Amino acid sequence: MSEPLILQPTLPPDACVIWLHGLGADRYDFLPVAEALQGALPSTRFVMPQAPTRPVTINGGYAMPSWYDILAMSPARAIDHQQLEASAQQVIALIESQRDGGIDPRRIFLAGFSQGGAVVLHTAFLRWHGPLGGVLALSTYAPTFSAELQLEAAKQQVPVYCLHGSHDDVVIPSMGRAAHDWLNQRGVPVTWREYPMGHEVLPQEVRDIGIWLSAQLAC
């Protein structure tokens, strides 16, 4: 397993963002975003792990970086849950490493784009049992959120920022909105923000993320 890419801050680190890339990308994908954000967050470390390379069924079995296999696209994503759980455990190990290195988990954030976002939502709300600073869910969905599931009361203290493109034809907006609504119905402080874009990240979105992270870290 590849080591994560780590962007160290200019000041002694007192916060951390663990950021997961999307399907077919790599750990360098969000390095420019992390560098841009760190300008306003000079004591925040960014940790960008690498997904394993493996065959992806919906892409004809072609091997690419993926946090889990996607078996079918409709009516809803059919996924390899065992691989998703392994990815969640990878994220938990990173949280624990940052915590053990002296960063308060309340100042550790999980961020993920597309498939990476699905992993961080699953990890933050269904697998990690400690506190967190918050979750950034970019152009993503939540394949493991179901109607019968309830949340630990402590999860109602974890803020979530959902950002999505109104023209996204890869993860359609209604999939992202369903994750937002599921969290909202369970008392999680979740915010929805939509942009006139496809399955991508825009400069305005990055600026909004910086404002949101700064606000959470100031609490």
Image (tube, helix red, strand yellow):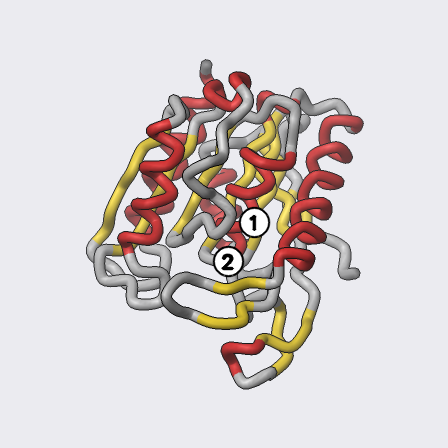
Q: Is residue 116 left or right of residue 49?
A: left
Residue at 70% from the left image edge and 65% from the top image edge: 52
- Of all residues shown, which one is farthest toward the top? 219
Query: Does residue 61 sit above or below 127 in this rendering?
Result: below
Q: CA distance from mark 1 to mark 2?
A: 7 Å
Q: Is residue 89 left or right of residue 132?
A: right
Query: Does residue 32 sit above or below 209 in this rendering?
Result: below
Tell me the residue that label 2 is attached to.
115
Tell me the residue that label 1 is attached to.
119
Amino acid type, callout 1: Val
On the image, the x and y values in percent for residue 217 come to: 49, 22
How many C-alpha atoms fall within 10 Å of the one at disc 2: few (<14), some, or many (≥20)?
Answer: many
Asked which secondary structure carries label 1, the reply is: helix
Asked which secondary structure carries label 2, the reply is: helix
Labels in figure, total: 2
Amino acid type, callout 2: Gln
